[in-house]
Amino acid sequence: MKVVAVNGSPRKNGNTYSALNYLEKIFNKNGIEFEIIHVGNSLIHGCTGCLTCRKTKDETCVFKEDLVNDAIQVMKEADGLILGSPVYFSDIPGTMKSFLDRAFYVSTANDNFFRHKVGASIAAVRRSGGIPTYDNLNKYLLYSEMLVVGANYWNVIHGRLPGEVLLDEEGLQMLDTLGNNMVWTLKMVKESKISKPKHVKKHYFSFIRD
Ligand SMILES: Cc1cc2nc3c(=O)[nH]c(=O)nc-3n(C[C@H](O)[C@H](O)[C@H](O)COP(=O)(O)O)c2cc1C
């Protein structure tokens, strides 16, 4: 089994990375592979709403120059996904948001291939804005019908300078809980003999009546 984490921080080895790296040890101890895709330190085009991905249905975004299409395939092969992000102005930083909009829209346009993966979000923050960021990260997972795993608190970890989150003892316990809950959920999904619900074509209703 494999878990893929997306690091939305422009600081490759910052607090988001420290939190993901902490989780990596739990997965490795349980025989689960782990890979981090560094997104925040890259140049990533925003979604332009061209809807080409819905027409071609070839699992790609029309913008081919950045890492998004490669990352989509790595995420597609994973059993679990973690979205890790720093907090910028109480929300997801722009580069990470561009990545998530495109990757998750491509998945949705292709019968939602992220569906039923095990997922979790983590926000790294100095002081405040962690909860809206965490909520907004979870929206991508929940929209994709993923099995979103929780911990003993909402997954917000505190620190300013790189590595400071490792001093957040309550945050580390939360990561332990999250990692162990994810391992358990991944194993349950793998061993389950219960068939998954069928995919239904999404119904769009625009609220406009004439
Ligand atoms: C542009 C910018 C905006 C930020 N906005 C917030 C904020 O709204 N609330 C907060 O508590 N910290 C804020 N921070 C601090 C970061 O969230 C904090 O340093 C976090 O640990 C960074 O994670 P990273 O090391 O993974 O990049 C901001 C930092 C930057 C550079």
Image (cartoon, helix red, strand yellow):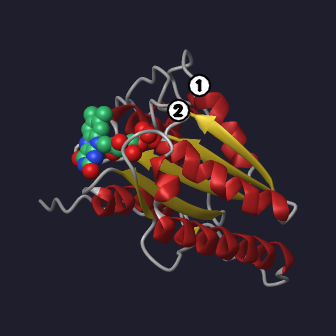
Front position in the image: 90 or 47: 90
Q: Is residue 142 left or right of residue 135?
A: right
Residue extending furthest left?
210
Q: Is residue 156 left or right of residue 88?
A: right
Q: Secondary structure at mark 1?
A: loop
Q: Is residue 103 above or below residue 141?
A: above
Q: Is residue 150 left or right of residue 123?
A: right
Q: Is residue 196 above or below residue 194?
A: above
Residue extending furthest bottom?
194
Q: Which residue is mark 1?
A: 67
Q: Horizontal and vertical percent for residue 96?
A: 43, 37
| Residue drawn at the location 81% of the way across and 57% of the way down | 28
The quadrant the N terminus occupies is bottom right
| Residue drawn at the location 82% of the way across and 81% of the way down | 192
Q: Amino acid at mark 1?
A: Leu
The reply to whether the C-beta atoms of the residues labelled 1 and 2 are less than 8 Å apart is yes
Image quarter for residue 120?
A: bottom right
Q: Which residue is mark 2?
A: 39
| Residue drawn at the location 32% of the way across and 50% of the way down | 126
Disc 1 to disc 2, how far (Cα)?
Answer: 8 Å
| Residue drawn at the location 69% of the way across and 73% of the way down | 180
Instruction: Name the N-terminal-most of marks 1 and 2.
Output: 2
Quadrant location of ligand 1? top left
Q: Horizontal and vertical percent for residue 201?
A: 53, 62
Front position in the image: 164 or 59: 164
